[in-house]
Amino acid sequence: MPRKKKPSTTRPAEPRGLRFGVFLRNLLLALVPVVLVWMFLTPFLDNFLRVAGESLVHLTESPDVTRLLPAAADRHYAQVQRLDFPPARRNVSNFRVTDVHFPFVLLGILFLAVPEVPWRQRLSRLGWAALALLLFDVVLVLFWVKFIYATQLGAWSLEHYGAFARNFWGLGKHVLDLPIKLALPFALWVGFYLDRLLPGRGESAAG
Amino acid sequence: MAAEKQSAGADKTQERRTEGAAPTGWRAHRREITFVVLFLLLLAGSFTLLSWSPVNDGFVVPFTAGVAKVSGWALDLIGQDVQMSGTIIRSPRFAVNIENGCNGVETMLIFLAAVIAFPAPWSARLTGAVLGVVAIQLVNLVRVVALFLTGAYFPDFFDASHTVVWQTVVILFGVLLWIFWADRFARPRRAEAA
């Protein structure tokens, strides 16, 4: 008696190669719309990252004394406040939230530029990658705030953070804010599209 | 019945063969996972190494001073009256200090980590790495000159231009350069691979 075949769980084969010229053209075409969408979303992203980042910081402190508020002079900045400090010294520092989330532009144009991908699949992949980038950005806000507390408040930092903690938050913020933040859109893109660039399975890459 | 058993056995063998040819689950993504993990480890490791004081003082600071000097020459060449002092470029209109983050090192590290992590012949990796680093530094030179001119003539746009626009442009250039290299030079040609 013939048995029913199980539906295949393997991925459908991606087309090989990227057609770099088409990729570059698509990238340039996507640039302006993606920048416009990012500019439109910037107030929402600023707000979300402030609120989510503040909640994450609260997990590391008791009682909850940190507030991340939009700066009065420029709403793209987050004003870091500590409620346990005297009112005159509550505003301990600030940082620009748009600097945290501008790699969304890079992510958008890279994902939209790949040729020969159905739109549904393209947008679904972009959605998952954007979610991963957003989660990373929330973690980056935590590192920004802890970096300020651990290294930027002089005697208070030395009193409340040991040498290991100062190095951890300092180096962590440094590594996450420069190379990882800038490389993450590319790493996410590679996660979905590396197959287009690699030799086919069974082909040899050794030269 | 015996024929059915034989047929079922043949099916199982066929399934095993199929599994061997096309892995499923996470194994189907093994190459992507390997690349991304290796890439991020190389990137974070090399950046941490460069942040270490002896390496920073012995390599990054002199390199950044070199970038500042070449940028000063380029600005001089296009008629800007600039004076150099270490990593500071100063003119009557504007002054800028070239620091880590403005020297193109992050983009170089991203590019080099991606080149090393990609399964290409070592000769292709070496050629790509050398030419890529030179190209990235040329684009970074354009960035420093453009930022100086922005600061001198359009100071309101300097902040956004510095952190958002040019950082995106330089990183995007490094990424595109890697994609171009991986697509055109790092993969074996079909005739060779066959």
Image (cartoon, grey):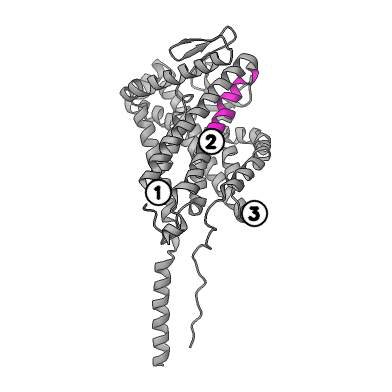
Mark 2 Cα shell of 10 Å, populated few (<14), some (14-19), many (≥20)? some
Q: Nearer the viewer, residue A181 or B112?
A: B112
Disc 3 residue type (three-letter): Trp
Helix, strand or loop under label 2: helix
Figure quadrant of residue A118: bottom right
Residue at 38% in and 19% down: B62
Residue at 52% in and 46% down: A189
User: Residue B194: x and y, percent?
Assistant: 43, 62
Name the side, left or right, on which B105 lies relative to A37.
Answer: left
Q: Which mark is residue A119?
A: 3
Q: Which mark is residue A72?
A: none
Which mark's residue is nearer the viewer, 3 or 2?
2
> Is residue A139 visible in this depiction of the protein?
no
Chain letter behind tag 3? A
User: Residue A111: x and y, percent?
Assistant: 58, 46
Residue at the spot of label 1: B120
Q: Which mark is residue B173?
A: 2
A110 vs B3: above or below: above
